[in-house]
Structures are given as structure tokens and as C-alpha cells.
Image (cartoon, helix red, strand yellow):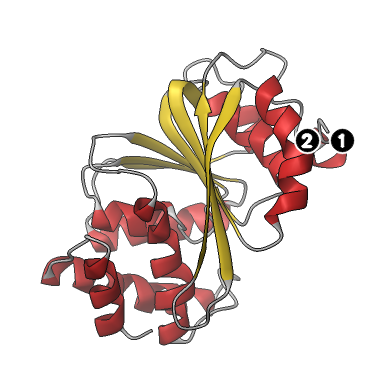
Amino acid sequence: MNSEQFQNSLKEKGISLSASQMNQFDRYYHLLVEWNEKMNLTAITDQPDVYLKHFYDSITAAHYFDFSKEFSICDVGAGAGFPSIPLKICFPHLKVTIVDSLQKRITFLNELAKALELEHVTFCHDRAETFGQRAEIRESFDIVMARAVARMSVLSELCLPLVKVGGFFIAMKGANLTEEMENGSKPIQTLGGEVTGINSFQLPIEESERNIVITKKIKKTPKKYPRKPGTPNKSPLW
């Protein structure tokens, strides 16, 4: 997917990008490749693949959820900024917080935000488990997102404690979601969530399967969650 196809594909979905926004994506791509030579940010570096598998893929969440309001978003384990930074470029009014466990990635994201002149973005070097137990952070976000981080039974424990009651947890997943949801449905309920939509589609051009799971936070998460760092992955709730 070249930049023109990227712009046209988004326009077909009702997302129109200005020349300035397209320049931000171009700068994003070049900084990603430049920094990737110094640290492992992504295995995907060819420009058409980055535009399709990182930029466009990140924005597909907006095909199933309305980001037009001034939401506060927390992106858990965003790595090189996916999905929240592409969404931030498309919807500049969003307030974005990224939490990631590697300081090197946080350093890259800070430099990226300066280069792209992004406002209302915050980057936190922390584990999701400890981040979600911070009194000033817990249950404070309108939306919490994660892409390619962990299976649903684990991911729900990392993300739902950060979502305010009435807010949403949006999980961006690949293929083979059925088993994940079978094992993840009970933890989601335990943590105060209710799945309101599972959206399946194919990524353009390569036609690989994608799934976006939208969960509404309907009650407060029990205080004992999330558990200590590493515990959710070693001993999932289900």
C-alpha cells in the first residue's frame, strides 16, 4: 500500500487526511526506519508494508468505533506507537497516554512526538500491572487499547482496570480469535467488562484476517486486579 492508496482507502471509510497529516505519516515512517537501525522497533520496514500493516491497520479501529469525541486513550504496550499514534494523527483532538515497559521505546516515542508536533500525548515507562494500580491512573481513561500484546485472558487484566466505568476496552487482534474469546470471556466479566462487539474483516491487499473486540466497562474492577507484574501471563484468570 503506497501513501496514495493509504489516503484513498481511508477516504473511502470517511477519514480524510490533509497534506499536513500525510506529511506526519511520511515523517513517522522515516523516523521509524531510522530508529529501527539502533533498536528493535519493528520487523516491518518496507514502506508499503508499514503503511498497510502498521498505519492502516492501526486506524481500522476507527471503522468500528467513533473517535470524533475528545476521548482520553491509554495504549498498553504500544511499542513503536501502534495503534494510538496513527489514530492521534487522524484525530488530533484525542488525548493519548502510552505505557510501555521498555525505556528505549519511550525515548523513541518522545522524539517522535516532538518531530510530529503532537500535543496532548504522554509516555510512561511502566509495567501495565503496576500502572493499573496507581490511584491517580486507575479507572481514569475513556478508552484503553492494545494491539498484538497478549491473549484476551491476559490482556483484559492489563487493560480493563484502567478503563473508567462507562468507557471502553478495544483489543485489536489477528486471526484465530474464537479460542481466545472462549478463554477470555469469564475474565472480562470478572474485571467488570461486557463485550459489545466483535468485528472481523480482512486487511486490504494481503487479505489477512483481523478482529477488533470492543468491550464496555459496566462495573468497577475488583481492587486486587491487576495482580503483580508477570502474574497475569503466568497464571491467567481462565
Q: Residue 167, how many percent across, how many down?
A: 43, 26
In this rendering, is residue 168 above or below 85? above
Q: Quadrant of residue 8?
A: bottom left
In this rendering, is residue 164 above or below 215? above
Q: Residue 28, how many percent across, how many down?
A: 34, 70
Which numbered tag is attached to residue 111? none
**Numbered disc 1: secondary structure:** loop
**Residue at which label 1 appears:** 235
Q: Residue 208, how many percent across, how many down?
A: 57, 74
> In what quadrant of the picture does the N terminus appear?
bottom left
**Residue at which label 2 appears:** 232
Given the image, on which type of amino acid does mark 1 rest? Answer: Ser
- Dot 1 alpha-carbon crowd within 10 angstroms: few under 14, some 14 to 19, many 20 or more: few
Q: Residue at x 61, y 21 (%)?
A: 133
In this rendering, is residue 235 above or below 150? above
* Depth check, front residue: 46 or 59: 59
